[in-house]
Amino acid sequence: MDVLADALRVSGARGALGFMLEAGESWGLWLDSHQGASLHVVARGTLWLHVAGERPVRIGAGDAVLLSPGTAHGMASGPDVRMGACDVESAARARAEGSVFRLGPPPVR
């Protein structure tokens, strides 16, 4: 039984768009233009997940979050960090090159 595949199927996830993200110090990224389901997996470090109308939630290494299609949300280094729009061109370039999308100055946390 593949629980993740079942969860993605039930959520309405179709296709894929993904990239590796590394972030350091103070950073924030608001993602409100993506209409599909969103899956975020934290490999190391921590981030704060912000969902419109909800309190921020701390997400740590080993955690995964699946958001239903069209859920406006953001990720940031802290619960009170101001988030900017995603640089879609840089993210697409990182994905196409298989490189890492970087936010904020090092060190990565």
Image (tube, helix red, strand yellow):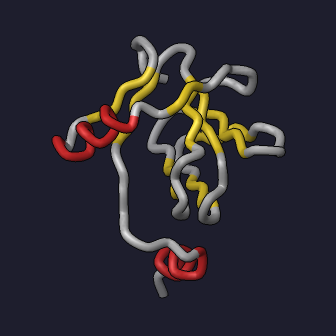
The foreground one among 49 and 83 is 83
- 52 relative position to 31: left or right: right
Residue projecting furthest to the left? 97
Residue in the picture at 36% in, 56% down? 17
Residue in the picture at 82% in, 45% down? 54
Q: How many marks?
A: 0
| Residue 50 in picture, x, y percent from top left | 70, 39
- 85 relative position to 55: left or right: left
| Residue 30 in picture, x, y percent from top left | 58, 35
The foreground one among 96 and 7 is 96
Q: Is residue 37 above or below residue 32?
A: below
Q: In this view, does 15 lie above or below 82?
A: below
Q: In this view, does 93 lie above or below 72?
A: above
- 20 relative position to 75: left or right: left
Which of the 4 image quadrants contains residue 101? top left
The foreground one among 60 and 38 is 38
Q: In this view, does 15 lie above or below 21?
A: below
The foreground one among 26 and 83 is 83
Residue in the picture at 36% in, 26% down? 102
Residue in the picture at 40% in, 13% down? 106
| Residue 35 in picture, x, y percent from top left | 54, 59
| Residue 90 in picture, x, y percent from top left | 31, 32
